[in-house]
Image: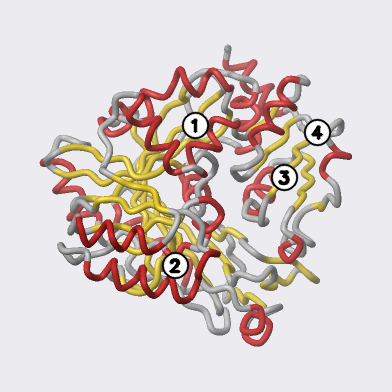
Amino acid sequence: MKKEQLKNTAEIKRNFLIISRWGETLDIAVAILNEGHAVKMYIEDKPSREIGYGFVQKAKDWKTHVDWADVLIFDYTGYGKICSELRAQGKLVVGGTEYSDLLELDRNFGQDELKKHGIKILPSKEFFNFQDAIDYVKSHPNAYVIKPSGETQEYKQLLFVGSDDEGLDVIRVLKAYEKSWGNDFGNFQLQRKVKGVEVSVSAYFNGKEFIYPINVTFEHKKLFPKELGVSTGEMGSSMFWTKDSPIFDATLKKFEKSLAKGGLVGQLDINCIVNGNGIYPLEFTSRFGYPQIFIQRAGIMEPMGNMFYKLASGENFKINVRKGFQVGAYMVVPPFPFDDKKSFELFSKDSVIVFKKEQKEGIHPMHLKKINEEWLITGNTGIALMVTGTGLTMKDAQRMMKNRISNIIINNVYYRTDIGDRWSDDFDRLWSWGLL
């Protein structure tokens, strides 16, 4: 495509309909809106539906706006069948397929597909009750990770990474889960634990092939600095973009033909543990990662609306990205990461976000509404903002992020202060293993 044609493509204003599970993509909706496009946003989860009021036009029933939309964006797994049906009707859709949904939601299926594609995986076993799992650990003593499957995996604090080589800590936690959850826990996996660097690689897919460059992300999942406290899903990430990655070539690249069969459009991420012995994939994320997408946005130089349109159109293009690094930290309030409606209403609901200086670059609205131009916390999770920074070095990116955080006042706020600190150690190890 010629430069003039590309320019004209970018200048065309389109209608974007965002179908969101929990309102996670407000920041993306606002970005596309600010680029001059029309945006409507639907949120499926009822307690989250106030998110976005004042920022973007809300839709009560997304299905009544399908004809209006030029591009539909589904922001979570579980919509794969609907996405495929809409594509069959000729609609441009950013979203998954039934196949990509299963890669994330069914851990056993994901692991089987890795094996089928010739990728080495860690030993794991699925269980449907706690006693069987306890008996298994007793007869196969080792260090394990407890990984909930299905819908229970949304409770990130239930994931437990054992450290005892005999599995005694895992047995204690399984007994505690049995008392507190009983039969409501659902199925879960025990996966063998290995030591190394935890890193994820991701790329965007245009329905036929992966689009470059590749994104390499280092997640910070625990609530407190130095990886202390409960697992939250994520408190922030550091990342960079690269034209090639040995980890990507050994994992996601092998799925290109399988993904093309269903016509996936969007992002696919695989989280891995890597060490001197190899690359061990842990799990897929077959959608935007949160907060990964917001930190990526800090590094993407082209308009997001235009990028999603090109993806959904099946265009082969290179994403224009910044050199260097991007970092981002969530700013959260009680009861995060726990589900406690009373605490949220007591400490956090309708809390105002105050900016010392009126500078909002690198500030990504999360679970917020806007009233009289003031940003107020809403929803029910306590995720207020994602704050990002960029730089040619990791320290430059961290400095920018911390300066932006220092400009914000939120009552009862907490956040990680060490996002990106692991990079020097991780870099040394990855470089020595030939994985950069």
Residue nearest the viewer, comparing 92 with 303: 92
Whether pointer 4 and pointer 3 mark residues with C-beta atoms closer than 8 Å, the reply is no
| Separation of residues labelled 4 and 2 (CA atoms) | 37 Å
Label 1 residue SS: strand
Task: Report the quarter where the C terminus lies.
Answer: top left
- The amino acid type of the residue labelled 3 equals Ile
Q: Which of marks 4 and 3 is in front?
A: 3
Q: Identify which residue, 135 or 43, lies in the foreground.
A: 135
**In this view, the mark in front (1 or 3):** 3
Of callouts 4 and 2, the N-terminal one:
4
Residue at horizontal 39 percent and vertical 48 percent from the top:
126
Alpha-carbon neighbours of circle 2 within 10 Å: few (<14), some, or many (≥20)? some
**How much space separates mark 3 and mark 2, taking CA atoms?**
26 Å
Q: Alpha-carbon neighbours of circle 1 within 10 Å: few (<14), some, or many (≥20)?
A: many
**Residue type highlighted by circle 1:** Tyr
> Could you tell which of marks 4 and 3 lies nearer the N-terminus?
3
Left or right: 77 in relation to 159: right
List the residue tagged with mark 1: 204
Q: Name which of mark 1 and mark 2 comes first in the sequence.
A: 2
Please tell me how many numbered marks the rendered image carries: 4
Q: Which residue is drawn at 45% across and 60% down?
A: 233
| Residue found at the far bottom of this picture | 346
- x%, y% of residue 417? 36, 71
Residue on which the image places disc 4: 69
Label 3 vs 2, first from the N-terminus: 3
Q: Name the residue under label 3.
A: 19
Task: Identify the residue position indicated by label 2 in the image.
Answer: 157
